[in-house]
Amino acid sequence: MDKIVKDVGDIQSRLIDHRPIIQGEVRFFVREFEEKRGFRESRLLENLNRMVAETNEQVVPKCSETMHEHLCEALTRMEAATHMAQKIQQRELEAQQSTRLQASMDRRKADWEEFMKEQARLRVEVDEEHAKAVGRLSTQYSEMKKDLSKFSHF
């Protein structure tokens, strides 16, 4: 009877007591991620953190400064263009009052209309290219989103 009780106890400990198996798996996991890999993941994360901090401290302020400089330059150019446009408008008014410049004004108007037609045509082309690019990017991002969703299920 003692042997049966001992055998039943051994069988029960093998079926129910999983501590030796779990301890082996834990040791394997620790050895795999700490000893074999040599903390590569933490070093990688530290490098990424350092790069992000460097970007925040150096690149972002530099980009902001450059952007501010270029915006100020663009504002100056816009003001100059506005001033020139006002001068041109004033000259047009003066030219309309003069009868001898009427012929040249008609030519300039025809040139201007042709220029505006060309600009309208170019605008349509640019709008079409933009729409195509938006379509391609939308398709690409939707495919990337699908690929990402496939990987997120793991």
Image: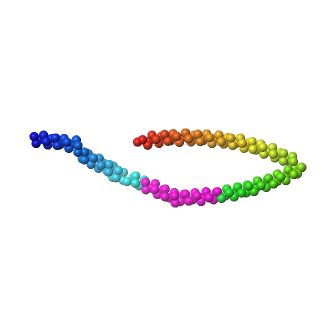
Location of residue 116 by image quarter: top right
Asked if the magenta segment contains residue 1, the reply would be no
Dominant secondary structure of the magenta stretch? Answer: helix
Residue lying farthest right? 100
Residue depicted at x 14% and y 43%: 6
Quadrant where the C terminus sits is top left
Residue depicted at x 81% and y 47%: 108
Location of residue 152 by image quarter: top left
53 or 120: nearer the viewer: 120
140 or 38: nearer the viewer: 140
The magenta segment is 45-71
Please provide percent x and percent y for residue 86.
Answer: 77, 55
Left/right placement of residue 29 relative to residue 52 reads left
Please provide percent x and percent y for residue 7.
Answer: 15, 41
Location of residue 1 by image quarter: top left
Asked if the magenta segment contains residue 69, the reply would be yes
Please provide percent x and percent y for residue 145.
Answer: 50, 42
Residue depicted at x 75% and y 56%: 83
